[in-house]
C-alpha cells in the first residue's frame, strides 16, 4: 500500500473512531436551577465580548513579528550585500505603530447615510490597498536580491504563512 493510501486509511479510521466515541458519550448532567438575578452571571457571549487590552495585544504582535523576521533572516541566510534590501523589507513589513481602530459601533454606523458608509468603506479599502502595495513592493525588491536557493526558501515560507 502506498504512503498516501496508508495515511488516508489511518485518517478515516481515526475520524470514524472519534465519531463513534462522541456518539456514545452521555450528555453532561443538568446544573442546579438558577435562583439569582440574571444580570449577576455573565451570559453565553461574555467571553467572546471581552476584548484584550490593545497595548498588550500590540506588544504581543510586535514580539511575534520580530521573532518571525529573525527566523526568516536566518533561514534565508542574508548576506552583507543583501542587508540593505533586507532592512527595507523588514521596515515595510512592520506592523502599524498604533493599534488598529476598533470597528465602528453598530449604533454609530446606523447614524451614517448610505453615501457616508460607502465613503467610509472606500477609505478603509484604499488604506488597506496602499499598505498591501507598500508590502508587495518591499517583497519584490528583496526577492530580486535573493539567490535562486534563497528565493525557493522564501517561496516556501510565504506559502506556509500567507
Image (tube, helix red, strand yellow):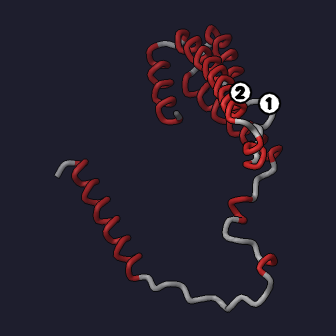
Crowdedness of circle 1 by 10 Å Cα count: few (<14), some, many (20+)? few
Q: Position of residue 83 (x, y in %)?
A: 66, 13
Of 135 and 13, the residue lying toward us: 135
Question: Mark 1 = which residue?
Answer: 97
Q: Position of residue 57 (x, y in %)?
A: 76, 45
* Location of residue 99 with respect to 82 vertically, above or below: below
Q: Is residue 59 left or right of residue 149?
A: right
Task: Measure the alpha-carbon separation of dots 1 and 2.
Answer: 8 Å
* Location of residue 25 with respect to 79 vertically, above or below: below
Q: Which mark is residue 94?
A: 2
Of 50 and 55, the residue lying toward us: 50
Q: Position of residue 119 (x, y in %)?
A: 69, 27
Q: For residue 96, which quarter of the picture? A: top right
Of 69 and 33, the residue lying toward us: 33
Residue at position x 55%, y 14% from top?
Answer: 140
Q: For residue 17, which quarter of the picture? A: bottom left
Q: Disc 1 on helix, strand or loop?
A: loop
Amino acid at each position: 500500500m502506498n504512503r498516501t493510501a496508508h495515511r488516508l486509511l489511518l485518517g478515516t479510521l481515526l475520524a470514524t473512531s472519534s465519531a463513534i466515541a462522541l456518539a456514545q458519550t452521555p450528555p453532561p448532567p443538568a446544573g442546579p436551577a438558577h435562583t439569582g438575578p440574571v444580570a449577576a452571571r455573565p451570559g453565553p457571549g461574555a467571553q467572546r465580548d471581552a476584548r484584550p487590552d490593545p497595548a498588550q495585544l500590540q506588544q504581543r504582535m510586535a514580539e511575534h513579528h520580530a521573532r518571525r523576521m529573525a527566523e526568516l533572516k536566518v533561514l534565508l541566510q542574508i548576506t552583507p550585500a543583501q542587508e540593505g534590501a533586507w532592512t527595507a523589507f523588514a521596515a515595510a513589513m512592520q506592523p502599524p505603530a498604533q493599534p488598529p481602530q476598533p470597528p465602528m459601533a453598530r449604533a454609530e454606523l446606523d447614524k451614517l447615510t448610505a453615501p457616508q458608509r460607502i465613503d467610509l468603506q472606500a477609505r478603509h479599502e484604499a488604506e488597506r490597498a496602499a499598505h498591501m502595495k507598500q508590502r508587495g513592493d518591499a517583497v519584490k525588491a528583496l526577492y530580486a536580491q535573493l539567490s535562486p536557493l534563497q528565493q525557493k526558501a522564501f517561496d516556501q515560507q510565504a506559502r506556509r504563512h500567507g
